[in-house]
Amino acid sequence: MMIFHAERPIYLQLMDELKGQIAAGRLAPGEKIASIRELAASYAVNPNTVQRALAELEREGLLSTRRASGKMVTEDAGMIRELRSALASGQVEALLSAMESLGFSPGETRELFDQGLRARGDQQKEAGKKAGKEAHIEEGGNS
């Protein structure tokens, strides 16, 4: 369940959530989204709030209404790429502002970011090796 913050209208927060799902591919291009009532129940909000969020997303071109089919995610790959890029840029800007407010220089921020990327890569390599060993064991191999 999503936690909404009082300082910002819920419909805008819901729009951000749905945009994030579209950008991440959890709502695929051309996919039918849940009904207003289903979304309202899922997010524990008023159906009018959901309707407003969906209307705005449709106005922005991220959703469309198909007669007898409901609301669908846009199939415009360029629009989804732009959305994804804009959301990522916002995250980068927020990170840079936070690091700056903590007193980190751009060089220090870059080094910490690089360290984090290296650590993440190492974790992914280890997870891949572990998954490979488990698959090998399931196939009857020895380890």
Image (cartoon, rainbow, N blue to C red):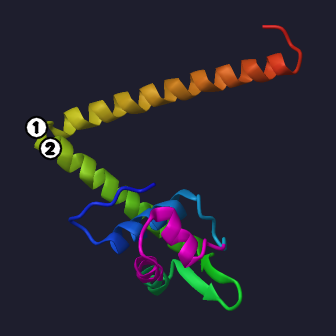
Q: In the rendered structure, which amino acid carries the disc numbered 2?
A: Glu
Residue 71 against residue 34 in the figure, above or below: below
Q: Secondary structure at mark 2?
A: helix
Where are the magenta residues, as a range?
A: 32-54
Question: Considering depth in this image, is 71 or 83 the residue closer to the camera?
Answer: 71
Give the residue displayed 83% in from the left and 21% down from the top: 138
Q: Residue furthest right?
A: 140
Q: Are marks 1 and 2 in contact (CB under 8 Å)?
A: yes
Q: Position of residue 60 (x, y in %)?
A: 44, 82
Q: Position of residue 74 (x, y in %)?
A: 59, 77
Asked if the stretch drawn in magenta spans residue 46, the answer is yes
Q: CA distance from mark 1 to mark 2?
A: 5 Å
Q: Position of residue 3 (x, y in %)?
A: 36, 56
* Residue that badge 1 annotates: 103
Q: Residue furthest top?
A: 143
Question: Considering depth in this image, is 19 or 114 the residue closer to the camera?
Answer: 19
Give the residue displayed 60% in from the left and 25% down from the top: 127
Q: Position of residue 52 (x, y in %)?
A: 41, 82
Check residue 55 in the rendering and tell me which mark sits there, or answer none.
none
**Left or right placement of residue 107 versus residue 128 in this view:** left
Give the residue displayed 63% in from the left and 70% down from the top: 29
Quadrant location, the C terminus: top right
Give the residue displayed 74% in from the left and 20% down from the top: 134
Q: How many marks?
A: 2
Corner quadrant of residue 67: bottom right
Residue 125 against residue 88 in the figure, above or below: above
Q: In the rendered structure, which amino acid carries the disc numbered 1?
A: Gly
Q: Secondary structure at mark 1?
A: loop
Check residue 100 in the rendering and tell me which mark sits there, or answer none.
2
